[in-house]
Amino acid sequence: MIRRTATWIATAVVLGGAMPLEALAVDEHPGRFIAANCTGCHGTQGRSTGGMPSLAGLDRSYILNAMEEFKSGTRAATIMHQHAKGYTEAQFALIAEYFAAQKAR
């Protein structure tokens, strides 16, 4: 990853700075990359098109609580308990912050 990033930056410099410096900025929602795993079922930016609940705009504490319950097995689920076991509490917080910041439809 570091090598690829260095190559990308070097290419941008060689091309005369064709890429704006803003492209190198840190994402304003660091949880977006972790939450990307959720979008396959819950829709882009957490806006489901049906079948699964939308996560966009839900309260942060609600999402955190649900993920903790899935992980512990106290909340009924078909697959979410398996997904939740792969995340840390810090990652739950990032995911919850990201989806809470998205606008619901």
Image: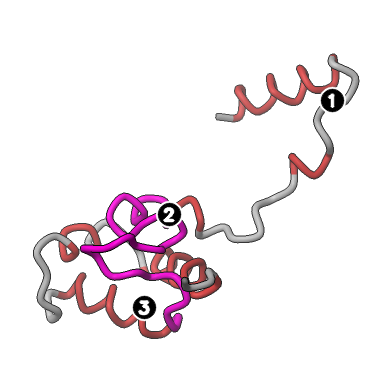
Residue 14: image location, x then y, percent:
85, 14
Evaluate if marks 2 and 1 touch, with contact meaning CB atoms under 8 Å apart: no
- Please identify the residue farthest to the top as the structure is shown: 14
Circle 2: element type: helix
Q: Earlier in the sequence, mark 2 or mark 1?
A: 1
Q: Amino acid at mark 1?
A: Ala
Against 21, residue 62 (above or below) is: below
Please give the residue where the numbered disc 2 appears in the rendered image.
Answer: 44
Residue 88: image location, x then y, percent:
35, 64
Q: Which mark is residue 34?
A: none
The part of the image, by quadrant, that contains residue 44 is bottom left
Tell me which residue sits at (51%, 56%) in the image: 32
Please give the residue where the numbered disc 1 appears in the rendered image.
Answer: 18
Tell me which residue sits at (40%, 63%) in the image: 47
Looking at the image, is mark 3 or mark 2 nearer the viewer? 2
Looking at the image, is mark 2 or mark 1 nearer the viewer? 2
Please give the residue where the numbered disc 3 appears in the rendered image.
Answer: 64
Q: Amino acid at mark 3?
A: Leu
Residue 24: image location, x then y, percent:
74, 40
Circle 1: element type: loop
Distance from the alpha carbon under mark 1 to that under mark 3: 41 Å
Q: Is residue 78 magenta?
A: no
Residue 97: image location, x then y, percent:
51, 72
Circle 3: element type: helix
Image quarter where the N terminus lies is top right
Provide the residue span drawn in magenta: 34-60
Judging depth in this view, the residue of 29 and 68 nearest the camera is: 29
Against 48, residue 17 (above or below) is: above
Q: Is residue 39 magenta?
A: yes
The part of the image, by quadrant, that contains residue 49 is bottom left
